[in-house]
Image (spheres, helix red, strand yellow):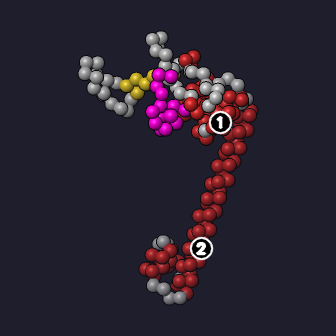
Amino acid sequence: MENSPKCHHKFQLNDAETGVKFTDVIEINTLELGKIPKQDEQNESTATINTQDKPSTPTEAKYSKRKYDWLRFLKAEREEEFDMLAERSPVIKQAVVELKRLSQSEEAQRLYDARQKAIWDENSRMRTAKNKGHNEALIEVAINMIKRGTPLQHIVEDTGLSVAEVEKLK
């Protein structure tokens, strides 16, 4: 966009004659990394995407800062830049972690993926064990209720077990 000093443009579908918006679902965003303004050395939180678009509300200021951080992420070249941005935003931190993972050698990626799979498998085993323990506790409660002579329907309602499951316990 040679005629614009802005580094970010958002295009939407409008009728050429009337300007009526076709939809708000589709938009095209462009970023020109070469036009990213220099960071305000005094106060990073005052950095804005476009010097012509000064934020008028705290929400706009936060949005501008967030957008500016993402532009800096896309333009970053040194690990220190990525690490500094990661400290400021948990979402950018996730992106930095993923970028570092993708930048690893094939062997390092394979080891990372194997570690992730092991973590997921362990979490799944823990959930299964927890559910099994919960079910065993329900069965124990149902057995105690049977011993006390609690009506079948009350046992089913209180434990969530089926009639057939409670009948097996008798």
Check if mark 2's residue and mark 1's residue have beta carbons within 8 Å: no
Give the side of residue 133 with respect to residue 157, left or right. right
Q: Is residue 128 visible?
A: yes
Return the x and y of residue 22 as percentages of the image width and height: 30, 28
Q: Position of residue 52 (x, y in %)?
A: 47, 22
Does the magenta run of residues contain 153? no
Q: CA distance from mark 2 to mark 1?
A: 44 Å
Residue, disc 1: 86
Query: Which amino acid type corresponds to the residue marked 2 in the rendered image?
Result: Ala
Q: Position of residue 146 (x, y in %)?
A: 52, 84
**145 or 79: nearer the eye?**
79
Q: Residue at x 61, y 26 (%)?
A: 40
Is residue 92 depicted above or below 31 in this figure? below
Residue at the spot 65% in from the left edge and 58% down from the top edge: 126
Q: Is residue 162 above or below residue 107?
A: below
User: Quick check: can you spot residue 164?
Assistant: no
Secondary structure beneath dot 1 equals helix
Image quadrant in which you'd find residue 16 = top left
User: Which residue is outermost to the left?
Assistant: 18
Say which of 31 and 100 sits in front. Answer: 31
- What's the magenta region? 51-65
Identify the amino acid type marked 1. Ala
Q: Residue at x 56, y 78 (%)?
A: 141
Residue in the foreground of this view, choosing between 166 and 81 = 81
Packing grade of label 1 (10 A; few <14, some 14-19, many >=20) is some
Which is more N-terminal, label 1 or label 2? 1
